[in-house]
Image (spheres, grey):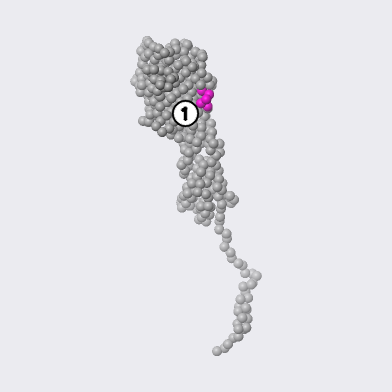
Amino acid sequence: MRHVSSFALLGLLAACSGNTTNPTDTVVTEPEPLAFDFKTTIPATEFTASVSPTTLEAHQISNMLFASMGVLSSDEKVQDLYNANGGGKYRSVLQCWQRPQFPRWSFDIQFDTCDSFQMDGAVNVNNHPSGILLFNFSNFRISGREMGGTLAFDTTGAFPDSLYWNTYNTTPENPGQADDSRVPIGVTIDGIRKGITYDGGANVSFLNQELSMWGTATIEGEDDTITFVHGSADENEVAPDDPPGASALRKSLNWLDCRCPTSGVSAVDMPLEVTEVLVDIDDMEVDPDEVDDIAIDIPVTHTIEGRAVLDHTGCGEYGVTYTSDATSMSIDRNLLLGRLTFLCDTNTIDDDERCAALFRAATRLPEQFEVEITQMDLNQTARNAVDNDFDVGWCRIQ
């Protein structure tokens, strides 16, 4: 057997391995994996929200009260009482209802002949011996809404001029502003009955053919209370003896024109119930790359507290100004992770490496991250919510 010395073996190995240092050879290295970091506060591209049911009901009840007084104020004999009680004079227009042709100081108006105008029930009109003009509603209905109770028109405490009244809910047996005389007016919508405590003022202008009202309607149900302000953005600016001028809610004395206010200002707390937020992935990335990523729609359940001021510009038409202290909403990280998973599983985002990187970035977010909202977005969302949910068709007599 031939033996090779250890020195010879080392030399042989050196010769065989000489190509490893050849300068023409390249070293292959793995590219860095795609990675992102997400901001913990992200601007919302847009969001979807609706008006809270409590506010929506308050709006409907407010319009029912105003519409009811609009119908009654169109009656010739009611206007005779306005003239007698409030120191004015005028005559009226067409009516579908029935009442005595020559009524005394108290009479009933029956609306069972007004089916074609979606009205029914009755109202007792009483020029009470105390000097208070009372409207006693008995199962009075307008297009699916029913009202019962008594609204007083009282010159005591009113603006000191003819055809101005202090208006409030009361009892017909013992009318007045004392606590034991204040019985709420009831309005039923979709089987739900709520009570109204009303404090305000009213004016009938026969020259301009208008009914004006201003004040506060406090609407109380089993679990909630909300105040609708008529005639101002501020409930402290609608005293019975201080008419708010052009801001008062107004409608024509011709009841066929419109059920709702056609001019004036009203205000109400209006929480927005957010159901979806849209965020752009590019806005989420701390260091955006050159890829134009999609926007992600995240389903949420979130309430934004705020207040709406409505400018009544026509029959069922509103301008909206919305104010809120909200600047952001907290979003659960798991909602974002779930949405990313869905978008990647359905190949809406069709790059597996990008999906993995986006998912890793999302998992590093806090459990709750913030989505910023702007005043412009709040106003637009409130505008859309009012357009979609507030009375429009109900206001217009078909």
Query: Can residue 69 be seen in this snapshot?
Result: no
**In the figure, is residue 182 to the left or right of 246?**
left
- The image quarter containing residue 152 is top left
In the rendering, at what x and y percent does residue 184 appear?
40, 24
Considering only vertical position in the picture, is 79 above or below 359? Answer: above
Measuring 55% from the left and 58% from the top, which residue is drawn there? 33
Query: Can residue 238 be seen in this snapshot?
Result: yes
Q: Which residue is mark 1?
A: 227
What is the secondary structure assignment of the residue under circle 1?
strand
Magenta residues, as a range? 234-238
Measuring 37% from the left and 13% from the top, which residue is drawn there? 106
Considering only vertical position in the picture, is 30 above or below 297? Answer: below
In the rendering, at what x and y percent does residue 247 appear?
53, 23
Query: How many C-alpha atoms fall within 10 Å of the one at disc 1: few (<14), some, or many (≥20)?
Result: many
**In the figure, is residue 341 to the left or right of 22?**
left
Measuring 46% from the left and 36% from the top, which residue is drawn there? 50
**How many numbered circles are shown?**
1
| Front-lying residue, 77 or 348 | 77
Which quadrant is the C terminus positioned in? top left
Considering only vertical position in the picture, is 169 above or below 7? Answer: above
